[in-house]
C-alpha cells in the first residue's frame, strides 16, 4: 500500500494536508467534576480548504459525544488554531481517536478535490 501512495505522490506531485498535534493526546481532569479534557492544535497546509470538522471516536469508529469550542470551524491557509476537547468520565475509556476532517465546498465540485482526515490516538 505504501508503495502505491509513493507512486501517486511522484506522479501527481506533493500531497498537502492539514496537521493536528499532539499525536497522542492525554485526557486529564478538567475544572468540571466528571469531565476530562485535552488541548489540540491544528495547522492548515491546504490552500483549497478553509473548513474542518472535529470528531471523537471509539475503537470501532463509533462517534463519542464531546464538547469543544469548535466542531466545524474556519481555518485559513497557513492558519493555526488551538482548541480544547471535553469528554465525560463515562466515555473516557471508550474514546480512542480524535480526528479532524477537511470539509470541501459543494461549489468546488468542478475540479478534483480530495478530503483529508487526520487522527490522533488517546493515550
Image (cartoon, rainbow, N blue to C red):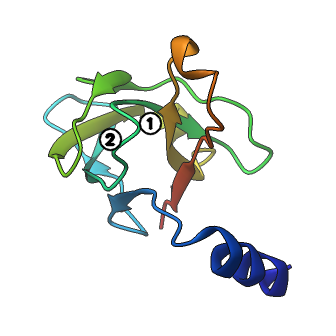
Image quarter for residue 114? top right
- Under tag 1, what secondary structure? helix
Residue 117 appears at what percent x and percent y?
Answer: 57, 48
Q: Is mark 1 in CB contact (under 8 Å) with mark 2?
A: yes
Q: Which residue is mark 1?
A: 89
Q: Residue furthest top?
A: 107
Q: Residue at x 71, y 83 (%)?
A: 6
Residue 46 appears at what percent x and percent y?
Answer: 37, 49
Q: Which residue is mark 2?
A: 36
The image quadrant where one finds the N terminus is bottom right
Q: Residues within 10 Å of mark 2 (few under 14, many from 20)?
A: many
Number of numbered discs present? Answer: 2
Q: Residue furthest bottom?
A: 3
Residue 93 appears at what percent x and percent y?
Answer: 58, 49
Q: Residues within 10 Å of mark 1 (few under 14, many from 20)?
A: some
Q: Residue at x 60, y 52 (%)?
A: 96
Comparing 87 with 41, the one in front is: 41
Q: Is residue 108 above or below residue 15?
A: above
Q: Residue at x 56, y 72 (%)?
A: 13
Q: Earlier in the sequence, mark 1 or mark 2?
A: 2
Q: Residue at x 53, y 12 (%)?
A: 107
Comparing 102 with 111, the one in front is: 111
Left-right relation of 70 to 55: left
Residue 49 appears at what percent x and percent y?
Answer: 40, 36
Q: Is residue 107 above or below residue 16?
A: above
Comparing 26 with 98, the one in front is: 98
Q: CA distance from mark 1 to mark 2?
A: 6 Å
- Under tag 2, what secondary structure? strand
Which numbered dot is residue 15? none
Q: Is residue 60 above or below residue 72?
A: below
Image quarter for residue 19? bottom left
Amino acid at each position: 500500500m505504501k508503495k502505491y501512495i509513493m507512486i501517486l505522490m511522484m506522479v501527481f506531485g506533493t500531497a498537502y494536508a492539514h496537521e493536528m498535534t499532539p499525536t497522542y493526546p492525554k485526557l486529564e481532569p478538567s475544572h468540571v467534576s466528571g469531565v476530562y479534557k485535552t488541548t489540540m492544535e491544528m495547522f492548515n497546509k491546504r490552500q483549497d480548504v478553509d473548513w474542518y470538522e472535529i470528531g471523537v471516536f471509539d475503537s470501532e469508529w463509533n462517534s463519542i459525544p464531546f464538547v469543544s469550542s469548535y466542531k466545524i470551524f474556519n481555518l485559513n491557509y497557513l492558519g493555526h488554531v488551538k482548541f480544547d476537547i471535553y469528554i465525560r468520565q463515562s466515555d473516557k475509556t471508550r474514546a480512542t481517536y480524535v480526528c479532524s476532517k477537511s470539509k470541501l465546498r459543494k461549489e468546488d465540485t468542478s475540479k478534483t478535490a480530495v478530503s483529508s482526515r487526520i487522527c490522533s490516538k488517546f493515550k
